[in-house]
Amino acid sequence: MKTTSRLFVALSSLLLGLALPVRAAENPPSPAWGKAADNRIYAQQLVNELMAKYPELVVVGLHLTAPGAKVETMIATNLDRVGKQDDDDDIAVAQEHKTVLAPNMKDPHKFEVQVPLKDAAGNFIGGAAGFVFKYNAGDDEVQLHIKALAIRDELAKKTPNLAALLMPSK
């Protein structure tokens, strides 16, 4: 019986580990990263509007590869990480249209949902939106996913195309 229980625990741990996305270690702040308050592009205006409208959001980050750039970065966020190079999961969301649902490993009161960005016509535009929600154990993660998709679709209605996100804000 003990062997069966140990085997079950080992297999459960292995399967749980495979289900969780691999997150790169958090980079320390870089002097090269811009401050959200200094970011004067349309995407930042949209992030600021979302943060004001949705009190359940802790973080919003918009990611994409700017025209002419070679790497995908965070182009707008409420954090002072503008220009931070994206991690593998951010890139997979943008390029492969994957969705990431993950509790924050450092803070159990946060839950991240990353979804591919769309434009007003409903086309994927090669970017990702990351939403970090306030979270308590037992909260309905499916509902957080649904909420993230609704917020992403709200953003899409205000996004004629990828280039518009990088235009100077009014």
Image: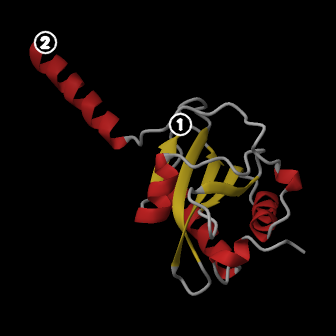
Dot 1 lies on which element? Answer: loop
Q: In this view of the protein, which residue sits in the foreground, 20 or 93?
A: 93
Q: Which residue is mark 2?
A: 2
Task: Check disc 2 and give the amino acid type.
Answer: Lys
Image quadrant occupied by the N terminus: top left
Circle on res. 75:
none
Decide: is 65 above or below 12. Answer: below
* Residue 60: percent from left, percent from top: 69, 54
Q: Residue at x 59, y 63 (%)?
A: 65
Left or right, residue 157 beside residue 113: right
| Residue drawn at the location 64% of the way across and 81% of the way down | 161
**Quadrant where the image shows the C terminus:** bottom right
Give the amino acid at mark 1: Ala
Residue 164 lies, in percent from the top left, at 72, 78
Q: Earlier in the sequence, mark 1 or mark 2?
A: 2
Q: Nearer the viewer, residue 3 or 170?
A: 170
Q: Residue at x 53, y 56 (%)?
A: 114
Name the outermost residue toward the top: 2
**In the rendering, at what x and y percent does residue 46 appear?**
76, 67
Q: Quadrant of residue 154?
A: bottom right
Reply above or below: 33 against 40.
above
- Badge 1, how many Cα within 10 Å: few under 14, some, many 20+? few
Instruction: Identify the residue position indicated by label 1 in the image.
Output: 137
Residue 63 in sight:
yes
Q: Report the front residue among 108 and 68.
A: 68
Direction from residue 62 to residue 7 in the image, left or right: left
